[in-house]
Structures are given as structure tokens and as C-alpha cells.
Amino acid sequence: MSRILATAGTEFRIALRNRWVAIAMVLMALFSLVLAAAGSAPTGGLGVDRLSVIVASLTSLAVYLVPLLALLMSFDAIAGELERGTLPLLLTYPVSRAEVLAGKLIAHLAVLALACAVGYGLAAAAALWADPAASAGLPAMLRLLATSVLLGATFIGIGYALSALSRRPSGAAGLAVGLWLGLVVLYDLGLLAAIVADNGGWFTVHGFPAALLANPADAFRLYNLSASEATAAAAGVGGAAATVPVWQSLTSILLWPVLALALAIAAFRKVIP
Amino acid sequence: MTSTLKISALTKRFAEVAALTEVSLTVAAGERVALLGHNGAGKSTMMKIILGLIPATAGQVEVCGAAPGSAGARRQVAYLPENAAFHPALTGLEQMRHYLSLRGESPSKAMELLEQVGLGPAARRRIGTYSKGMRQRVGLAQTLIGTPRLLVLDEPTSGLDPVSRRDFYALLDGLAARGASILLSSHALTEVEARTDRILILSKGRMVAEGSLADLRRRADLPVMLHVTPRPGAGEAVAAALPGAEPRADGLVLSCGQGEKLAMLARIAALGDLVADLDVAPPSLEDLYSHFSKRDGQ
């Protein structure tokens, strides 16, 4: 455990020096504040509190931004060590590869959690300041924060796996961008196209909810939209939230980080320094 | 004596290329062993197998009584890679504290270790600003963590200036005196000559020679070079008295076998006043090295 914490401390320091902490926090704060300002208009008409509406907007933001930040921080984790030539020495130390990854994960996750906490916190503060009744949306906000960290863990784990598989930072970066586009952007478009083509058949009823649950980003969106009562404020894929039980999306969100980390460890074990 | 490292019939192939073929060796506690060989002779490959970084194709390797790369072996082995590299954003001190923690030692010893390799004043600067020699010294400092039973050092003195090299070998002497075994590779043959107990020569993945420097000299039986400086004006007389001598700008050079050395010296001494000076050069490690690695290569 002390080895994991030592690794985490060193990695956090590196993230601080590389300005990742600052970049992530500024990015999340900026986008959250913009959403808080823009999302304040439609409140009255929907009959829900201001914060719940902001949570719905933040969910749509986080589903893009959290995986992106997670992949950006993690793609270099193993390929970078290989390229710098620091990996052979590290692996002769009495520390297992799983411990190395666990240490890196804690540090990167801490950066991400910090950025989310700052961003969401600012948005929540803005909402509460404008409307004291918005405190009704606080549980939804906390759920969003917790699931953002889990979503981040999933994509950080996937980033490590890509880093180990590609062995070169440039290759890993390419794979990471491709994966982000695929899972976060194109996946939903593909599903929508399939629904249109299916025209209310088997896929729309059974295949579509399963496909949403299989994608960690979609599961994250489903869970946050259906758990809070802000579904009405959401559009697009979010509309499907009503048809999928909350426990199913929550299970997907909880399982993905474990799966991603197992994948990362398996890929890292195959790396020959 | 207990051996820290035991290798028998080690073979490593990369696809069709044989990097190591049937290499066997043992290193005893407190022994300093130098591994010599051309680039690509298999030195680094052998070290990586000993460290458990890459698997062997065949043969047995036992490191401190454990399998290479096992947790037990890694706790007792220190490694210095050929080009020691560290994260450029960390300071020397931070990097050393990290390595101490990974070995379960107190991070507070970091400064002391850095001072031991002369990096005290630069400890709080980022490694990104270090010269190659300074990075190499961070690498050396981390091999001193704890009490390793085996040190595997790949070109440890590359990038170090002559004074630092001397300090480095003094550090090694201290470690060996405490019972640590040292396996190092080097291109600086003259340092290895004075500072190691045994020499191994690898050529194209095969062990072509093994023994102390005196052993190797005897076995190679290379000629001794005698450099004779005649008195001014006596050059022709000396050359006539020493048939076979090769004239040079500053005198004559003779070569003779180990066995004929004393007879030859007597002949030169008999020339008396005609000779101004005489130097005797035994075969250097360079000569031995090229002798052994060439013999196998053909």
C-alpha cells in the first residue's frame, strides 16, 4: 500500500508540474459556469428547481469532457515511460505492475475529481445564490460528482490499456482520440441511425437499451438523467432514460472501472521493457 | 562461499537471432565481475534476463536464491540501466524519495544518498536540467538504496568525468567489502583492469573467456612489447644488434613472447651504453579483449 501511495504522490506531483491539474480545473470551471449561466433561463416553465436543471446540463457536458480529460491524462502513462526509458528501472523495483497502475490511477483520478468538484461546485454555488430552493437538487449534484469520478476511472483505465498496447505515446494518443470519438460521439449517432432504420422493431425495444448500457458514457448519462427528475429537461438519447431501470445503469457504471482496470493490468503485463 | 548469481547454459533467441548461447557463470558474494563485449555482444540482454525484465529461452538463472524478476530477487538486486533516465519534471530529491519509498526505506535518506554521489547542490533542481553525467549519478545513487546483495550496472561510468569515475569505483569497493556482488559492463577497459576481480568476455552471445586478468594474460600468451631508445648516434649499432626490431621515430620496438622476455632483456642490457632507455609494455586489456573476441568470431 505504501508503494501505491508513493507512486500516487509522485504522479500527482508530475501532473501538477505538467499543469494538468490547472488545465483540468480551469476547463471544468469554465464550462460549468457557462452552463450555469445559460441553464438559468428555462427553470420556471419546467417546475423543477434550478440546480436539477443545471445537473442535467452538466451531465451532457461531463459525458464529453470527463472521458476526454481522462484519456488525455492517461494515454502517456506507460508509452511515455517506455519512450523516456524509465520503465526498465522501475520494473526492477520490488513493486508489481498492478501496484504501479493503481498508484497512477489514484493520482489521475484525484486530478479529475478535483476538477469536477471545482466545476460542479461553482455551478452549484451559482444556482444556490440565485435561488435558495435549488438545494433540492444537491443530491443529484452529488450523484453526478460520484459517477463522474467512476466514468473518469473507466476512461483512465482504458487509456492505460491503450498506452500499454501501442507502446508509443503518439500511437497511444491517436488511439485515445479515436476511442473518444467512437464511444462518446459516433456511438450515439450509430444507435440513432439504427433506430431510424429499425422503425420500432426488436432493436428499438431490446437492443437499444442494452447498447446504451454497454457504453460507459451512455450508462453515465442514463443514470444521471433518470436518477434525478430532470429527464424532462434533457433531449436526444436522454429520452431513453425513462425506459431503463436505474439499477441497470448504476451496475454498468460500477462495473466499467473494474473491467477497464483489469484490461489495463492485462495489457501492461504483456509489455516487455 | 555462497554465490549470489548462478547462470547455467543460458540461451536467448530473438526470433531467429541468437543473442546468447549457452552462457554459464557464477558470481560469489563480494565479488566484482566485469562483463566485456562489443555492442550487440549480449551484455545488456544478459543483464535484462538476470533482472527478470525479459525471459530466457533456455537455461537456468538463480538470483540470490530466487527466480529472476521474482519479488524476492527484486528486493535484493539493484540496477543501473545503460542510459539512466528519469521523469524530467521531478527534482533529483523527489525522484530519490520515490525510489526509497518503493524499496520500503525512509524517504528522508534521499539527501544523504545524493550527497554521496556529489549531487547535493543540485538535489532541488529538476532532472530535466541535469547533464548526462548528473543523471548517471542519480542512477548510481538509487543503486545504493538499502543493502542490495547484487548490483547489476550497465556501463556505469559512461558520461562520468575521470574524478567521478574514481569516486564511483571507491563506492563499489565499499559495497563489495560489505559482501555485495557486482556485475558491471564497461567499455572503459583500463578502469575495469584495476577495479574488478574477474573478467568475462562475451562475443556474439558466447562466453569466450573468463578469469582474472593474470589468468587471461597467461592464456592469451600475447607478445610483450619492448620499446628501446638508443643513445644519440647509436641508432644503427642498436638496430644491428637487435634483428627484427621495428624502427620508429623515437626508437625501436621489439615484440617477444612471454617466455623469451627475460632473455631479450638480457640482450638489451648487454648493449650497455648504447641504450638510453627501455620500456616494457605487457599486453593491455584492449589487446586481450580483441584477442579473445576475434578468436571466436572467425
Image (cartoon, coloured by chain):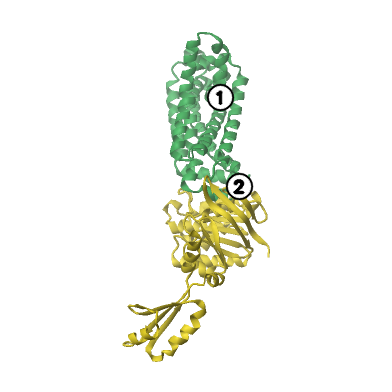
Q: Residue at x 43, y 28 (%)?
A: A31
- In the rendered image, is residue A135 in sight? no
The amino acid type, in three-letter code, at marker 2 is Val
- Mark positioned earlier in the residue sequence (2 or 1): 2
Q: Which residue is mark 1?
A: A138
Q: How many marks?
A: 2
Q: Quadrant of residue A169?
A: top left
Q: Residue at x 49, y 25 (%)?
A: A183
Q: Residue at x 44, y 41 (%)?
A: A19
Chain B: its colour in the image is yellow
Instruction: Out of A222 and B27, give the one closest to the viewer.
Output: B27
**Colour green maps to chain:** A
Q: Chain of mark 2?
A: A
On the image, the x and y values in percent for residue B47 come to 55, 54
Q: Quadrant of residue A101?
A: top right
Question: Label 2 vs label 1: CA separation?
Answer: 41 Å
The amino acid type, in three-letter code, at marker 1 is Leu
- In the rendered image, is residue B206 in sight? yes
> Can you tell which mark lies on residue A95?
2
Please determine whether, in this image, residue B65 is positioned above or below residue B283.
above
